[in-house]
Image (cartoon, helix red, strand yellow):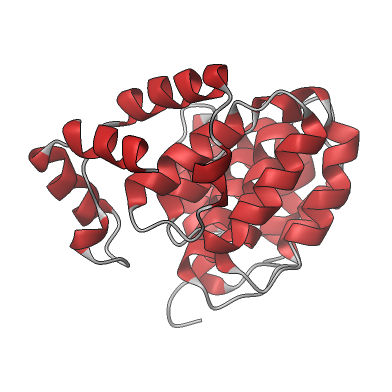
Amino acid sequence: MNEIREFLFDNSDAEYRAFQSKLIPNVDSDYFIGVRTPVLRKYAKELLKTGDVSSFMNELPHDYFDENQLHAFIISGIKDFDECIKELERFLPYINNWATCDQLSPKCFAKNKTELLKYIDRWIRSDETYTVRFAIGMLMSHFLDDEFDVKYLRLVAGVKSDEYYINMMIAWYFATALAKQYESTLPFVENKVLDKWTHNKAIQKAIESYRITDEQKEYLRTLKIKTRD
């Protein structure tokens, strides 16, 4: 732990620290050390190669954002699915911001999608904001292409929350689904199954996408819910 923290502070960047603090306003500015992401990713790979990360992984909760980021990148690089899941489930309850949540992306999931689904189904029903957000993110990353099924759209649409960071991910998911599975996703938008804010945000993000045709964008604009409705 001491060596890892020393490395982090040795690689801190005051300008980047200030930038990160503005991007993630829900945590105190003292939480950030300011290590740039490429440095953290490279360091995570080096630590995985040495295999000497157990004390760091067991030291939860971490004191700094950068430690959580490093932890996320280490988990993302674990090749064994069962080991990855074990470490992931220990870590998920300690995630306290969108950036760590969204940059946590285990590579081994791509080859273990069937096994992954049962965990997603449990995570998406969690009471933890970022566990739910992570579950939706995994559905977006791994189940909107060849493994797509409309039941996943229903699963995400069924998430009801007052949490901004959950609803933003739902909107992002449906915008991406419109880009990749337009015909299957459109009825969810036409029938306004999402709450007003999330519905409009999903349309906004879809309209901003280069993967949505101009004709589709024009129609989606007509489906926005007006504030007075």
217 sits to left or right of 137: left
Nearest the eye: 72 or 56: 56
208 sits to left or right of 172: left
- Image coords of residue 31 (percent x, y): 26, 58
Residue 146 falls in image quadrant: top right
- Image coords of residue 4 (percent x, y): 35, 36
Can residue 221 be seen from the camera position used here?
Answer: no
198 sits to left or right of 123: left
Nearest the eye: 124 or 170: 124
Nearest the eye: 208 or 50: 50
Q: Is residue 36 above or below residue 17?
A: above
Q: Is residue 79 above or below residue 99?
A: above
Residue at the left extreme of this rendering: 15
- Image coords of residue 219 (percent x, y): 56, 46
Residue at left 74%, top 59%? 123
Residue at left 44%, top 83%? 228
Where, quadrant-wise, is the N terminus in this rendering? top left
Q: Disc count in the image?
A: 0
Residue 140 falls in image quadrant: top right
